Image: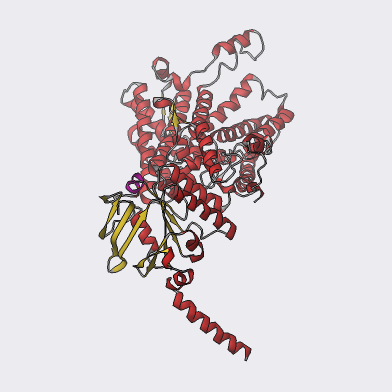
Amino acid sequence: MSTKSKSIQNKSSDERLRKVSKLKVLLNRPELGALGGSILVFIFFGIIAGDTGMFSAYGTINFLEVSANLGIIAVAAALLMIGGEFDLSVGSMIGFAGICIAIPAIYWGWPLWMSILFAFSMAVLVGYANGILVVRTGLPSFIVTLAMLFILRGATLAITRLITGRTQVPGLRVLVEDDPIAWIFSADAFKFVFTWLGSLGLIELRQDGSPLATGIPASVIWWIAMTLFATWLLMKTRYGNWIFASGGDKLGARNVGVPVGRVKISLFIGTAVAATIYACVQVLDAGSADTMRGFLKELEAIVAAVVGGCLLTGGYGSAIGAAFGALIFGTVSMGIYYTDVDTDWFKVFLGVMMLIAVIFNNYIRRRVTENK
Amino acid sequence: MSDNLVEFNNISKFFGSVIALKDVTMHIKKGQIMCLLGDNGAGKSTLIKTLSGVHKPDEGEIIVEGKKTVFDSPRDALDMGIATVYQDLALVSLMSVTRNFFMGREPMKGFGPFKTFDVKKANSIASERMGQIGIDVRDPSQAVGTMSGGERQCLAISRAIYFGAKVLILDEPTSALGVHQASVVLKYIVKAASSGLGVILITHNVHHAYPVGNSFTILNRGKSMGTFNKKDLSREKLLGMMAGGEELDKLEVELKEIDRIVKN
């Protein structure tokens, strides 16, 4: 009640603002936990595995790539979660999109760019289907997208076996080279920097003198670009305000004219499209599509989003947080190989981290929404 | 008659065989606060929903500034300047004051696809508006969850006024508030009316309604028991007319009876 004292000696709002320390403002940001967690993880591995090559150019690119792959879907999952819904079909969508690229390109003779566009249009369809089902039926998105998880994975497997007789479709690598758009998902960026660093002897080289780490993988660029874009959307656009409103209080938002249904449907399309970007990066990099690609990725994306400060109930969270959540995930999953710890312990770590994050987030939410 | 902002004439609403409202008539003038009183089940909610465009009346007419009108949706009513502040206030407690204030109607800057939410402008308008009603928002980016119930109510009302309400329909704005908070909100409602708005204040609390109202419509079992000007009505009479006035008398007798039995 003291915040509403009537005896305001100083009308200047700046005067009042100074009372809230910068630290306190920072403490209320959703991404704080993930940021702190990332720092801790880096300190930990810096001490344990600092001299093992984990933080060499090659090692860094390695764990960044793993983080980036997850980050691409985690950022979209975070937006959807802030909008108050889940998408459990992300992992299956990755497998499905991979097949949508590979089968037309290999078996039907489509140019690669055309099958990539085909995969993206299928993603829009799947996302739209998820969205319209959730919005129209009012069922929990958990159930609707769980159904979609099975439908997509099953369809991927069945269609692939029907057409190819196998569950893997190799042979894409040759198609990537001359394709006008495939490079967006597969090329390394800033190669010249790495070549230059290599020529100076600052980073590890192969036998032939080329650097071991050839450049920044496309997935890392996608990860950063998507995080920035999503953050801009959330903080600086009308649509962003609608995402928070739709997740925070569906009815209230609708009463003041926010098109809640449209917002949610578009967010579902967003997660499906992000899954397809993930699939493009993976399929074009590996040169083959696998029906089991992306298995369980939906849960990892949710872990990253939650560690990044998203509330499971919606209305609160951040894209930057989800990106850091993915960074923690990637760093630990790769870093564990550089330590003496058995890699079986990784999942234990993952679970514990998620529990801590949820408890921490709950505390933050109470701080934000109740009179301090 | 022409100074009526809105007239609701002989409004009836039926749900199947149930008569929810029958022949309710209300006229709202500029600068006036009309209190709509009634006990639970008197039809207050149905009336609000009919006034705000959620339900269409089965009989009767709505006249806005002299023109006969039909509301097809709440949006229609809103476009004509009839804004309803529901009990849930349509506020999201996790979102900031500013983001709530402009929810669904964000001020934009820039061109074409690069239009962005003008956070700076929104912040300054929200602070200014809240300042006008005596609520000092230290930081417009603070979450609404940190505000008190009265402050939230004022925020919701002030938002409706900012976005061009001519008639405000307030659904139980003081029901969940303590004495001090309620008086802050009531003061603000009077201020809003004196600036030229018409206000329909729905409540079952006579003690809140009587000091601020100019006229009183009492609803009982779906029917209007008439509209009374303040000068023709004492607080006691108003209390007595609310459904339950008799029942309270009866209750008093019964309590005395119990008291007597206990003592013996």
User: Residue A6, percent across and down?
Assistant: 64, 48
Which residue occupies the foreground of this view, A214 or A368?
A368
Picture coordinates of residue B47, whole percent (x, y): 36, 60
Residue A165: percent from the left, percent from the top? 36, 34
**Is residue A210 visible in the rendered structure shown here?**
no
Does residue B27 appear to the left or right of A223 in the view shown? Answer: left
| Residue extending furthest toward the right | A47
Left or right for A67, reference A135: right
Query: Which residue shows up at 56% across the image and 26% down it?
Result: A65
Q: Quadrant of residue A180?
A: top left
* Residue B260: quadrant of the picture: bottom right
Q: In the rendered structure, does residue B142 fall within the stretch colored magenta?
A: no
Q: Is residue A240 above or below residue B21?
A: above
Please determine whether, in this image, residue A181 is positioned above or below residue B256.
Answer: above
Q: Quadrant of residue A162?
A: top left
SS majority, magenta: helix
In the visual, does B65 lie left or right of B143? left
Q: Nearer the viewer, residue A236 or A5?
A: A5
Q: Which residues are magenta?
A: B75-80
Q: Nearer the viewer, residue A275 or B146?
A: B146
Q: Quadrant of the N terminus of chain B?
A: bottom left
